[in-house]
Image: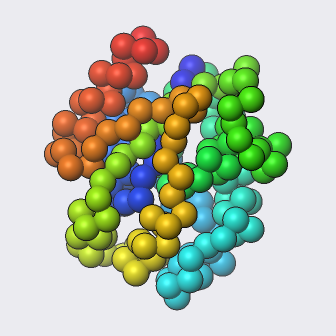
């Protein structure tokens, strides 16, 4: 079993995630759907979330991944996972809240998570955010997300794919990688 976590600063992760899940026949979750109402209201007001806002949300997403893993279901989760600490929480749950550096950590025996970093310039992502409607996070929060971003690095299990490609190409690149690596 492998859980694939799409992470980026962009609503594009939901589009890529749902298309990828359809192609692979996996279950798809959009992390934004699980933000508590307080987080949504804060973002609607243009106030960036802090760690205290995000940690319970990330722990809940971890629980979803663990539940699906226990049932034998491969899963794709679209989630910003901006910081290394956040990715550690997604892997380890509440135990990951004290994770300062994952380099000394072994892969959790119960789960394999592949982080897919969808990378793109702020201008491209800002343009896409301006086009979307009905989402609680306003485009004005984009800079705060870039400021908080800690791109994945070794030894994290990740690949980086450019958002400057068409969605179909992004999905194909990830699908090929997942099929070649995990079968």
> Which residue is more in the foreground, 139 or 60?
139
For residue 24, side relative to residue 104 (left or right): left
The residue positioned 32% from the left and 26% from the top of the image is 175
Indicate the quadrant containing the N terminus: top left, top right, bottom left or bottom right: top right
Does residue 3 appear in this view? no
Indicate the quadrant containing the C terminus: top left, top right, bottom left or bottom right: top left
The residue positioned 35% from the left and 22% from the top of the image is 177
x and y percentages locating residue 22 in the rendered image: 33, 35
For residue 76, side relative to residue 177 (left or right): right
x and y percentages locating residue 170 in the rendered image: 25, 38
The residue positioned 53% from the left and 52% from the top of the image is 150
Extreme residue toward the bottom, this view:
45
> Which residue is more in the foreground, 84 or 90?
84
The residue positioned 27% from the left and 36% from the top of the image is 171
For residue 174, side relative to residue 153 (left or right): left
Here the colouring is: rainbow
x and y percentages locating residue 20 in the rendered image: 34, 36
Does residue 57 appear in this view? yes
For residue 39, side relative to residue 134 (left or right): right
Q: Is residue 158 above or below residue 177?
A: below
Q: How many marks?
A: 0
x and y percentages locating residue 8 in the rendered image: 42, 52
Q: What is the quadrant of residue 103 in the picture?
A: top right
> Which residue is more in the foreground, 76 or 46?
46
> Which residue is more in the foreground, 128 or 85?
85
Q: Is residue 158 above or below residue 146?
A: above
């Amino acid at each position: 079993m492998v859980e694939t976590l799409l992470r980026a600063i962009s609503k594009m992760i939901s589009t890529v995630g749902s298309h990828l899940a359809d192609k692979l026949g996996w279950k798809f979750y959009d992390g934004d759907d699980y933000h508590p109402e307080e987080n949504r209201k804060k973002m609607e007001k243009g106030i960036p979330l802090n760690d205290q806002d995000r940690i319970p949300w990330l722990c809940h997403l971890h629980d979803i991944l663990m539940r699906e893993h226990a049932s034998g279901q491969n899963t794709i989760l679209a989630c910003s996972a901006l910081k290394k600490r956040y990715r550690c929480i997604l892997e380890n749950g509440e135990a990951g809240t004290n994770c300062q550096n994952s380099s000394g950590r072994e892969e959790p025996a119960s789960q394999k998570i592949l982080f897919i970093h969808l990378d793109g310039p702020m201008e491209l992502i800002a343009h896409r955010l301006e086009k979307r409607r009905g989402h609680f996070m306003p485009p004005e929060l984009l800079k705060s997300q870039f400021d908080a971003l800690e791109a994945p690095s070794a030894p994290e299990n990740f690949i980086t794919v450019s958002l400057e490609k068409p969605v179909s190409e992004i999905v194909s690149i990830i699908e090929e990688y997942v099929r070649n690596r995990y079968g």
